[in-house]
């Protein structure tokens, strides 16, 4: 169900004010964070969309552990609308153990989403998560304050992004009642398994509304999950490709490379493919680099996406799960100083 702009604004304002008081960090200049969201770990049955991504995710965790990153889980880590917490945690003891080493080292932050909002309850956290992550607290958001040697400053607000939606926020208790029935239907028929391509128009609308809220925040950016669409500097990958194509077409012929025609053809093919897979729907022109989205860890081809904050740089990254390659690729990268300069 779509959220109204007013409801989303009010909900994000409320979370932001809360984290300013309770979960506000000023990272060191050499701090390194990796942000993943929307795993939707299930119970290893036919309705479990995380299964194809499990090997990729474990490979990524090994990389970030060895390289000193703090791991931030930005919500919907577990699929608790469709499964019982004990079943999910039992099914993925290996993944949770891999994450637990970050917690033991003081390099682990958990934020809840709508599909794992059981973790809003301290009682549920104590019962289920504390045996794996002793003393853990699960937050509804995080605020990082960035500054550089030149005096550029800004806030990085992290939250899942479901806030304000009727079914995900106000009526979450009701949603959890009927979704177990849908889970059984999925298992029996294989119909309706959600992927990042499903409900593309609704997700595009929600991304646009999160952008519209973020652009009103002075010297601040929003990093969210929830929609499963990787967003860089407020733009989708399709928008980036279109900009590249326009730049090539309008380029002076004297600057054309020997592969110019092939480059144009490749971009046109990729744009057509992206339009079919992720229709732009309600996307609008976005002029401020104020909104970023991690994407998700449940792509059916085994790929996962996330966002790195690394010694003053911000990156949108993809880990390739195809054929067990587990290759890390930076899709986009720039300095936080440059981002905040334009805000």
Image (spheres, rainbow, N blue to C red):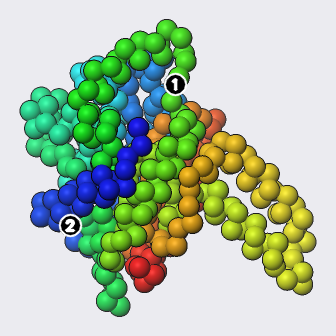
Whole-percent x, y for residue 341 in the image: 43, 83
Residue at position x 81%, y 77% in the image = 250
Whole-percent x, y for residue 326 in the image: 55, 44
Q: Secondary structure at mark 2?
A: strand
Position of the C terminus by quadrant: bottom left
Residue at position x 18%, y 63% in the image = 17
Look at the numbered discs 1 and 2 and tell me whether their residues touch, using CB distance below 8 Å: no
Instruction: Determine which quarter of the picture holds residue 2.
Output: top left
Whole-percent x, y for residue 146 in the image: 30, 75
Whole-percent x, y for residue 129 in the image: 18, 34
- Crowd around label 2: few <14 · some 14–19 · many ≥20 (10 Å): some
Q: Label 1 to label 2, Cα distance in Å?
A: 38 Å
Residue 74 sits above or below residue 31 on the image: above
Residue assigned mark 2: 25
Residue assigned mark 1: 193
Residue 318 sits above or below residue 1 on the image: below
Which comes before the other along the chain, label 1 or label 2?
2
Residue at the far top in the pictured view: 188
Residue at position x 45%, y 45% in the image = 227
Q: Is residue 62 left or right of residue 302?
A: left
Q: Is residue 103 left or right of residue 8?
A: left
- Crowd around label 1: few <14 · some 14–19 · many ≥20 (10 Å): some
Instruction: Determine which quarter of the picture holds residue 222.
Output: bottom left
Position of the N terminus by quadrant: top left
Residue 336 sits above or below residue 271 on the image: below
């Amino acid at each position: 169900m779509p959220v109204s702009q007013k409801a989303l604004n009010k909900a994000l304002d409320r979370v932001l004010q809360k984290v300013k008081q309770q979960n506000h960090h000023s990272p060191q200049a050499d701090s390194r964070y990796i942000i993943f969201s929307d795993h939707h770990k299930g119970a290893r049955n036919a309705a479990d969309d995380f299964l194809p991504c499990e090997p990729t995710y474990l490979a990524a965790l090994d990389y970030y552990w060895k390289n000193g990153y703090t791991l931030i889980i930005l919500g919907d880590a577990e699929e608790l609308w469709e499964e019982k917490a004990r079943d999910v945690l039992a099914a993925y003891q290996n993944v949770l153990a891999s994450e637990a080493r970050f917690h033991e080292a003081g390099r682990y932050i958990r934020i809840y989403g709508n599909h794992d909002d059981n973790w809003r309850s301290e009682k549920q956290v104590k019962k289920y998560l504390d045996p794996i992550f002793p003393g853990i607290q699960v937050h509804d958001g995080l605020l990082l304050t960035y500054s550089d040697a030149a005096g550029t400053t800004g806030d990085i607000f992290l939250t899942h992004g479901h806030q304000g939606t009727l079914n995900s926020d106000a009526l979450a208790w009701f949603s959890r009642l009927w979704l177990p029935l849908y889970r059984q239907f999925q298992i029996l028929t294989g119909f309706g398994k959600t992927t990042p391509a499903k409900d593309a128009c609704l997700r595009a609308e929600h991304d646009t509304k999160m952008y519209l809220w973020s652009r009103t925040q002075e010297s601040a950016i929003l990093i969210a999950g929830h929609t499963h669409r990787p967003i860089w500097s407020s733009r989708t990958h399709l928008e980036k490709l279109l900009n590249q194509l326009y730049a090539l077409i309008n380029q002076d012929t004297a600057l054309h490379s020997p592969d110019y025609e092939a480059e144009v053809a490749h971009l046109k093919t990729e744009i057509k493919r992206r339009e079919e897979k992720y229709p732009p729907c309600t996307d609008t022109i976005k002029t401020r680099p104020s909104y970023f989205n991690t994407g998700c860890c449940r792509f059916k081809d085994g790929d996962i996406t996330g966002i790195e904050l690394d010694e003053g740089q911000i990156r949108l990254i993809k880990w390739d799960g195809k054929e067990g390659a587990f290759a890390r690729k930076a899709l986009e990268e720039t300095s936080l100083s440059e981002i905040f300069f334009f805000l």
